[in-house]
Image: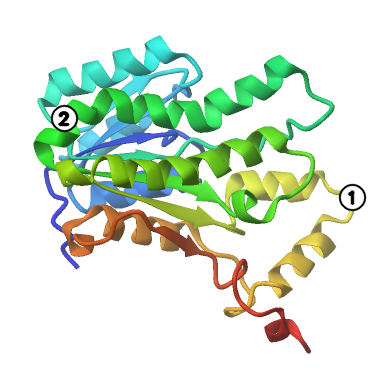
């Protein structure tokens, strides 16, 4: 399906992760649609990704940025806007389940909020004048932890809960500007980070099996490609009357009746 994203400038944070991560997968799908990705990330892997993208005849830009630092986000968005003169969409994709719980310090808790939530606010704040011109769209990547809790990760849970609150607030605030704002909620998705986490557990394979058995649809994890496909649809004009929504891409893991899991 042609989503009409060809030539659209899409600012995406957290897209210089490992290959197969959610951000990198969204990035790859954007390129396949001919969109112009503007990557904001602290990992210098972004330079490599941009070189690869440009070799395919698609323009791209990488702004190496510590998104926990407000001045760096402002500078990155300014660089993107100066190069292209427009911004058509923002995908806020930063997320680190950092395990900042009650044992953490005040500073660690605040750092978690800055990374996982405040960065979302700052990217949109600085992109907003251009989004108003383009009547663009904002997509926030959320987590089931905001809805279900997890334990031991207060900073991440608070951040992702805040991200959902901001999604609804911005949808209301920006409706007069015809800017749509939505969130994708992710549960269990097989990524390099998830693989690394499983490998740290004493009975990792057994734990993984138990998780997968609890996913109602097909008893399998959501793939990053499935998440990316939904993201691109939501930011496209094919989803032109959808705003303020939390779209859960999780095979029914969070919301469906537990009776489905009976053997």
Q: Is residue 105 left or right of residue 183?
A: right
Q: Residues within 10 Å of mark 1 (few under 14, many from 20)?
A: few
Residue 224 - label? none
Occupied quadrant, residue 161: top right
Which residue is pictured at 82% across the width and 30% down the height? 102
Q: Measuring 23% from the left and 29% from the top, which residue is drawn there? A: 128
Q: Nearer the viewer, residue 136 or 43?
A: 136
Is any part of residue 214 visible from this angle?
yes
Q: Element at badge 2? A: helix
> Residue lying farthest top?
71
Question: Mark 2 near mark 1, Cβ–Cβ under 8 Å?
Answer: no
Could you tell me residue 30's position as x and y percent? 27, 48
The percent position of residue 169, horizontal first and vertical second, equals 38, 42
In this view, 207 is above or below 143? below
The disc, 2 or 1, on the residue closer to the chain's N-terminal end is: 2
Q: Nearer the viewer, residue 148 or 55?
A: 148
Residue 105 vertical placement versus 153 (above, below): above
The residue tagged 2 is 130
Total of numbered circles in the picture?
2
Which residue matches tag 1?
202
Please state the horizontal and vertical placement of residue 88, each as a whole percent of the image.
18, 39
Where's the N terminus, which quadrant?
bottom left
Nearer to us of marks 2 and 1 is 2
181 or 208, nearer to the observer: 181
Q: Crowding at label 2, few (<14), some or many (≥20) Cα neighbours within 10 Å?
A: some
Point 53% across, 56% down: residue? 186
- In front: 221, or 99? 99
Q: Disc 2 versus disc 1: distance between alpha carbons?
A: 49 Å
Question: Could you say where residue 55 lies in the image, as x and y percent from the top left?
Answer: 22, 36
């Amino acid at each position: 399906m042609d989503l009409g994203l060809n030539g659209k400038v899409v600012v995406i944070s957290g897209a210089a992760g490992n290959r197969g991560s959610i951000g990198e997968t969204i990035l790859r799908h954007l390129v396949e649609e001919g969109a112009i990705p503007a990557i904001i990330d602290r990992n210098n892997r972004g330079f490599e990704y941009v070189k690869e993208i440009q070799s395919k005849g698609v323009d791209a830009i990488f702004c190496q940025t510590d998104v926990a630092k407000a001045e760096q986000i402002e500078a990155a968005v300014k660089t993107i806007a100066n190069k292209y003169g427009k911004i058509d969409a923002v995908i806020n994709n930063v997320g680190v389940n950092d395990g900042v719980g009650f044992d953490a310090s005040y500073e660690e808790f605040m750092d978690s909020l800055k990374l996982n939530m405040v960065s979302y606010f700052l990217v949109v704040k600085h992109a907003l004048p251009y989004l108003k011109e383009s009547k663009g769209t904002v997509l926030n990547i959320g987590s089931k932890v905001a809805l279900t809790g997890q334990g031991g990760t207060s900073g991440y849970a608070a951040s992702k809960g805040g991200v959902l609150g901001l999604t609804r607030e911005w949808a209301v605030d920006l409706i007069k500007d015809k800017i749509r704002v939505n969130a994708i909620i992710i549960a269990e998705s097989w990524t390099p980070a998830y693989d690394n986490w499983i490998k740290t557990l004493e009975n990792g394979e057994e734990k993984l099996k138990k998780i997968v058995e609890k996913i109602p649809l097909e008893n399998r994890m959501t793939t990053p490609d499935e998440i990316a496909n939904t993201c691109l649809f939501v930011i496209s004009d094919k989803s032109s009357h959808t705003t303020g929504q939390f779209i859960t891409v999780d095979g029914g893991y969070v919301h469906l009746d537990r009776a489905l899991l009976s053997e």
